[in-house]
Image (cartoon, helix red, strand yellow):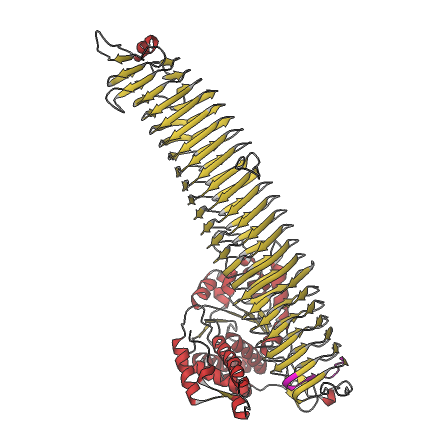
């Protein structure tokens, strides 16, 4: 028997039903009820499998509750509604209740109350709208299923869609918007598959997952959530051998979340693949509690905090993922969390690209870090790091920085174009092998006080100061390492520093190959030192290094000793050395050199970093280690010899005259006028700020306004601590080192944290201001950095503005000045440029881009270094080069054009 068709017409006298309820009561299973346009105030109880159709299309039939407080439509059978509008008056009450069977809504408009699916019922909704409800738009607490396809849920005072119980939800090509709660909430033991859906502007989360739920989110768009776009507080565990369990997010994008873009907390188990997370108000993606998180091929851009945060006892795997523009760290791991990162890139983060703290563990493999103003990778407290085959470029502080009791195992890391290479201040076990540090502004490797790091097969080239710095009481080990092309010394060892250096090569250094400061120690065996600017080995007073089987080649002097130096020398030799103390290889060993038998190196060493950058030794011929008193005239003449900087020279000379007047008034018993000696040095990198600062201190000492005039260099890492209570003592310690001299803070603007952050930079500034007030006559503070950033820095604290009232502007070097700098280096190293080389060099600098990476004087020095290397290769091909060939730099020695 064919299904019957029944008609409903409100004003019909015969051949049709006046109410929908009458038609339903008469119909048999599978019958169709066609409803004429109109308003139907009824309560429908549908207990059979029927189809209700709006005869003239969607929106023409409007069903409203006949009685307040009860659903307008209650279904206990598998019915289909096509084109009906169901309109309620009380949004807080259920408008449609499905208790059994499978109900289908096609092109329906459900407004003024929520849709509830309970018990074992199921609901299919296609091309429909659910709107103007409270608590939820659709609530499925069932063991059945919910299907939403091409459907809009909007204008809800609460959550858009809630699925709980043990039910299954399939949401496809649908949109949730204008809800005050979460867009979609999956809880209990429910399962949801959400594909190509959008959640726009929810008042809380875009997707909230709780309990033991399992969710698949595929190619969805979650936009402008007030809280987290995806918040997972618990989920079913994710099966490793199939695609069941957990929360799986594939593709799509998460944008503009008010808090984290994606949060996995509690017992959540989340896999995110090929997803874009942008502009989140907190972390891009975060894991907390005991959650598990896996990110694969994701893109996290411009979060207002860190890109990826893993803390608590969470475990995370991050593979082939890019984090860019984070206002915090790129990746931050804390507390007892563990993270494994493979591949991917972290670039342009405001703080350290990767930070590991607490007792957290991090494994990093093939990660790239680019362009951060702080450390590339920083490990503090009791954090543990395992790193393999990573590349770090453009780090404003250190490429790798270890502090506290951190432990690290490093294998195959490269650090390029950063402030420092590897800085180890951690007292935990540190092993570094097969690591390259290339073209850093300052030290290649720094071993802080009492550290015991081990370096094997590492290479440092092109360091702007020292290759390796060993601080007081540090006992690192260097085996099979290479240091080359440093502007300062190859290895610098401070008082009581005692490294073990074996089979290490040091070559082409601007100063000493090995500089052992007063009281320094250590064991140096089977090493080669060549082409050093100063004596290959310098030993300070009371230093007791053990020098065994060292070979010094191709340099002016092999050894210089200060008075009281007591090296233990055995088996050392010199070849191609103009003034050699040690014998040639294969000849009888000479007795150990004494201060009277070698040129004595004289140096005033105020800090290890100053040693590395400002001239480790100054040779004298009288064998005495006395520092001559400097005259003001000589110092001003030295200032005048600097290339360029005419405006700075004039400003310093004017200051000197002013200070001489102040000194005369004091000597005459007159009150000194109010005068701030503290200065702001504003200029781009490489414009001579550090050099002038060092001279300024010596000038103030010559005038009599400072006791010593030495320079102590500091930056953000020297002043700002990693935890509460750490910053004040760090800042005070550095300040005390500068007593009687100059404290030079480079890139001081980095102390000013980003708005809204909990950074400790403000504490460093406040401590500094107080110390400047307490010791106003004992220390001169110079803050330096880019001009615009320094103006913002001074404005950040009223105490700074009142103490730094004078700014010296360091202008970029023009092309003739850059050429002059190269010629100055050439003269100091016994080279000369041909006229054609000078013309080619001028054209080279004219073509050099003057962007953010332009290094001014540093660029000139690196160019000279490159020219000497290329000249060496060229001359090596000659059959019989003469002395002219050895010292002449020609156009073909210039590096490739920039």
Q: Is residue 648 left or right of residue 628?
A: left
> How many labels, in total?
0
Extent of the magenta region: 553-568
Q: Is residue 69 visible to the viewer in this orientation of the structure? A: no
Q: Is residue 697 or residue 506 the one in the foreground?
A: 506
Q: Is residue 631 visible to the viewer in this orientation of the structure? A: yes
Residue 273 in the image: state x and y as whole percent.
48, 45
The quadrant of the image that shows the C terminus is bottom left
Residue lying at the far front in this picture: please name it.
1
Residue 355 in the image: state x and y as whole percent.
57, 54
Question: 237 above or below 706?
Answer: above
Question: 36 above or below 845?
Answer: above
Q: Is residue 738 or residue 504 the one in the foreground?
A: 504
Q: Is residue 667 left or right of residue 117?
A: right
Residue 567 in the image: state x and y as whole percent.
75, 80
Q: Residue at x 24, y 19 (%)?
A: 37
Residue 646 in the image: state x and y as whole percent.
43, 81
* Residue 86 in which image quadrant: top left
Residue 349 among magenta residues? no
């Amino acid at each position: 028997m064919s299904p019957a068709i029944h008609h409903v017409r409100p004003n019909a006298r015969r051949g049709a039903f006046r109410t929908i309820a009458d038609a339903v009561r008469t119909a048999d299973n599978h019958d169709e009820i066609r409803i004429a346009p109109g308003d139907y105030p009824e309560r429908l109880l549908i207990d059979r499998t029927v189809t209700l159709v709006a005869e003239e299309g969607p929106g023409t039939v409007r069903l409203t509750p006949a009685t307040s407080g009860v659903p307008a439509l209650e279904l206990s059978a598998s019915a289909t509604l096509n084109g009906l509008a169901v309109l309620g008056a009380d949004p807080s009450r259920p408008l449609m209740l499905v208790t059994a069977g499978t109900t289908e809504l096609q092109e329906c408009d459900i407004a003024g109350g929520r849709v509830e699916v309970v018990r074992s019922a199921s609901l299919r909704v296609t091309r429909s709208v659910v709107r103007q409800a409270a608590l939820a738009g659709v609530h499925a607490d069932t063991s059945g299923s919910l299907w939403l396809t091409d459907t809009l849920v909007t204008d809800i005072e609460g959550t858009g869609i809630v699925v709980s119980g043990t039910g299954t939800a399939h949401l496809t090509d649908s949109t949730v918007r204008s809800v005050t709660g979460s867009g979609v909430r999956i809880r209990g033991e429910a399962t949801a598959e959400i594909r190509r859906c959008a959640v726009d502007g929810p008042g809380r989360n875009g997707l909230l997952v709780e309990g033991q739920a399992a969710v698949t989110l595929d190619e969805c768009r979650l936009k402008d959530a007030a809280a987290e776009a995806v918040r997972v507080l618990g989920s079913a565990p994710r099966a490793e051998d199939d695609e069941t369990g957990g929360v799986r997010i594939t593709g799509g994008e998460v944008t503009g979340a008010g808090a984290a873009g994606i949060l996995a907390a509690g017992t959540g188990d989340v896999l995110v693949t090929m997803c874009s997370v942008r502009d989140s108000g907190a972390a891009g993606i975060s894991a907390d509690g005991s959650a598990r998180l896996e990110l694969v091929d994701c893109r996290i851009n411009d979060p207002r905090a860190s890109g990826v945060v893993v803390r608590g006892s969470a475990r995370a795997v991050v593979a082939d993922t890019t984090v860019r523009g984070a206002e915090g760290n790129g990746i931050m791991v804390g507390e007892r969390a563990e993270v494994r990162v493979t591949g991917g890139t972290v670039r342009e983060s405001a703080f350290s690209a990767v930070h590991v703290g607490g007792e957290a563990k991090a494994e990093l493999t093939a990660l790239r870090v680019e362009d951060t103003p702080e450390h590339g990778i920083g490990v503090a407290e009791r954090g543990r790091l395992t790193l393999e085959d990573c590349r770090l470029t453009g780090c404003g502080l250190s490429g790798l920085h270890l502090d506290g009791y951190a432990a690290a195992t490093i294998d195959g890391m490269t650090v390029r174009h950063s402030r420092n290479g590897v800085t180890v201040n951690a007292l935990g076990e540190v092993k570094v092998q097969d690591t390259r540090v290339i073209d850093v502004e300052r030290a290649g490797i720094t071993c802080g006080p009492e550290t015991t790091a081990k370096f094997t097969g590492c290479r440092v080239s092109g360091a702007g100061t020292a290759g390796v710095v060993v601080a007081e009481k540090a006992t690192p080990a260097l085996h099979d390492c290479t240091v080359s092309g440093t502007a300062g010394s190859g290895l610098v060892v401070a008082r009581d520093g005692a490294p073990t250096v074996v089979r290490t090569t040091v070559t082409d250094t601007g100063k000493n190959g090995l500089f052992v400061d007063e009281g320094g120690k250590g064991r140096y065996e089977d090493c080669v030192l060549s082409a050093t600017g100063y004596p290959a080995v310098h030993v300070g007073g009371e230093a007791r290094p053990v020098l065994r089987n060292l070979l010094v080649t191709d340099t002016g002097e092999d050894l210089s000793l200060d008075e009281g130096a007591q090296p233990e020398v055995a088996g050392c030799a010199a070849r191609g050395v103009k003034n050699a103390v040690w014998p040639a290889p294969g000849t009888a060993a000479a007795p150990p050199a004494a201060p009277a038998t070698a040129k004595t190196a004289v140096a005033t060493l105020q800090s290890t970093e100053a040693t590395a950058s400002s001239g480790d030794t100054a040779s004298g011929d009288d064998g005495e280690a006395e520092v001559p008193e400097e005259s003001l005239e000589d110092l001003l003449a030295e200032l005048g010899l600097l290339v360029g900087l005419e405006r700075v020279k004039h400003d310093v000379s004017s200051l000197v005259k002013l200070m001489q007047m102040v000194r005369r008034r004091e000597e005459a018993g007159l009150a000194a006028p109010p005068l701030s000696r503290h200065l702001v040095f504003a200029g781009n990198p490489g414009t001579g700020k550090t050099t002038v600062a060092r001279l300024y201190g010596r000038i103030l000492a010559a005038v009599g306004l400072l006791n010593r005039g030495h320079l102590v260099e500091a930056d953000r890492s020297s002043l700002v601590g990693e935890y509460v209570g750490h910053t004040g003592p760090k800042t005070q310690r550095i300040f005390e080192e500068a007593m009687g001299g100059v404290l030079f803070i480079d890139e001081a603007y980095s102390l000013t944290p980003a708005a809204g952050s909990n950074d400790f930079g403000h504490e460093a500034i406040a401590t500094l201001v107080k110390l400047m007030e307490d010791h106003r006559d004992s220390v001169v503070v110079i803050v330096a950095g880019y001009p615009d950033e320094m103006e913002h820095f001074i404005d950040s604290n009223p105490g700074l503005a009142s103490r730094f009232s004078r700014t010296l502007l360091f202008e970029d070097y023009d092309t003739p000045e850059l050429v002059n700098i190269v010629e100055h280096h050439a003269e100091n190293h016994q080279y000369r440029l041909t006229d054609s080389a000078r013309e080619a060099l001028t054209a080279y600098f004219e073509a050099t881009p003057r962007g953010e990476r332009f290094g001014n004087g540093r660029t000139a020095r690196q160019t000279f270094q490159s020219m000497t290397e290329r000249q060496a290769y060229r001359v090596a091909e000659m059959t019989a080069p003469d002395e002219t060939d050895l010292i002449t730099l020609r156009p073909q020695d210039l590096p490739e054009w920039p």
